[in-house]
Image (cartoon, rainbow, N blue to C red):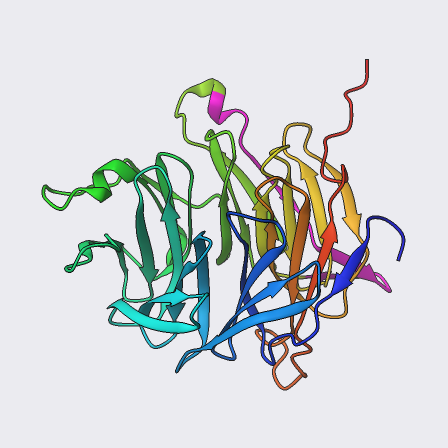
């Protein structure tokens, strides 16, 4: 394969990859969660699985804020602490339905979980009574992400809520979102990712489309928002439209990576509204993307299943050296 060096990890999960996160300490370590109930830690330089921690139910998301500790979201409604050094699990708390997303706030040092029970819960992971609050939402939570000051929650029925993280960290007082929005996308939102510069967020849908939105309500800021078609192909005159399952902003360049059920990853310059690059096609649908903290490596988790019925899952995890492939192209003079 031409382009930056790329490897496929051995001992991949046996079911679809749900989330990927590089270690906050080193780009050599990658955490992978899966519908097979496992959370696995790999040394990507040695292609070596260091530990595998098994859950009782599929793991729908994982976040990795500390080198020795991660937090998982379970289909069984559990939020768990994963000790990646000892290979052990501890239940932090529970929701009344599946937990779809977990997010860590490094600014305020607490965990957030979003569930199909239509709540977002905040957790003080060091406290003997960890649940800070349960904030009701208008619908089931499908995906969440946070920047330094805000949490973005995307839900069923096109509901979007933007929360002030500082307020969610406090145990007392009435809680209301800073913004209540309707999604710019007409169909179900699959993934949301916050911009590195803190100005807004991107969201993707099952209908091959990505929306770019900004927090600022001023006319100038809102004139910058847009949506575009992607992860589509035309075969024999027939357009095939694929869900966009994965989004991630590059931590150095603030460019956007997207992965879809067409088994491709694209890199976008959201400022010029142009695609920088499409990474050569993988064997199966792209379900998750992660970029290391310094931008050195990109991880891609693949696997069929959500839209393909009885088709074999074909789960796989690829890691590639990023180089400057996510760097915006110079503007024409």
Q: Is residue 220 left or right of residue 265?
A: left
The picture quadrant where one finds residue 212 is: top right
- Image x and y of residue 136, in percent: 21, 55
Q: Is residue 305 above or below residue 32?
A: below
Residue 186 at least partly seen: no
Which sits in the foreground, 150 or 34?
34
Q: Residue furthest right?
A: 2
Quadrant for the C terminus in the image: top right
Which sits in the foreground, 253 or 134?
253
Point 39% across, 25% down: residue: 217
Point 26% across, 40% down: residue: 177
- Image x and y of residue 11, in percent: 66, 76
Question: What stretch of residues is rendered in magenta?
Answer: 221-241
Q: Is residue 208 above or below residue 227?
A: below
| Total marks in image | 0
Which sits in the foreground, 107 or 26?
26
- Image x and y of residue 12, in percent: 64, 74
Which sits in the foreground, 152 or 74?
74
Point 28% across, 35% down: residue: 178
Residue 93 at least partly seen: yes
The picture quadrant where one finds residue 75 is: bottom left
Quadrant for the N terminus in the image: bottom right
Residue 157: in magenta span: no
Residue 235: in magenta span: yes
Q: Is residue 309 above or below residue 30?
A: below
């Amino acid at each position: 394969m031409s382009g930056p060096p790329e490897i496929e990890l051995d001992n991949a999960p046996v079911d679809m990859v749900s989330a990927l996160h590089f270690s906050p300490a080193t780009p050599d370590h990658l955490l992978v969660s899966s519908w097979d109930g496992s959370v696995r830690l790999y040394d990507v330089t040695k292609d070596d699985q260091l530990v595998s921690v098994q859950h009782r139910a599929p793991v729908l998301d994982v976040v990795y804020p500390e080198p020795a500790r991660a937090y998982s979201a379970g289909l069984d409604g559990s939020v768990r602490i994963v000790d990646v050094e000892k290979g052990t699990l501890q239940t932090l708390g529970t929701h009344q339905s599946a937990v779809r997303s977990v997010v860590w706030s490094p600014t305020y040092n607490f965990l957030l979980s979003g569930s199909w029970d239509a709540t977002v819960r905040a957790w003080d992971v060091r406290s003997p009574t960890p649940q800070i609050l349960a904030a009701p939402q208008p619908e089931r939570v499908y995906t969440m992400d946070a920047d330094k000051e805000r949490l973005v929650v995307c839900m069923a029925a096109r509901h979007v809520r933007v929360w002030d993280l500082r307020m969610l960290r406090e145990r007392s007082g009435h809680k209301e979102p800073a913004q209540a929005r309707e999604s710019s996308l007409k169909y179900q939102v699959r993934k949301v990712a916050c911009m590195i510069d803190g100005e807004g967020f991107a969201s993707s849908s099952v209908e091959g489309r990505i929306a770019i939105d900004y927090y600022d309500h001023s006319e100038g800021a809102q004139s910058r928002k847009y949506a575009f078609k992607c992860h589509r192909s035309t075969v024999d005159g027939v357009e095939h439209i694929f869900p966009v399952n994965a989004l991630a902003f590059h931590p150095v360049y603030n460019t956007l990576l997207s992965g879809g059920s067409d088994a491709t990853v694209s890199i976008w310059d959201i400022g010029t509204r142009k695609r920088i690059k499409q990474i050569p096609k993988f064997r199966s649908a792209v379900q998750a993307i992660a970029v290391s903290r310094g931008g050195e490596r990109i991880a891609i988790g693949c696997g069929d299943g959500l839209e393909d019925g009885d088709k074999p899952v074909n789960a796989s995890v690829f890691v590639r050296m990023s180089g400057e492939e996510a760097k915006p192209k110079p503007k024409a003079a």
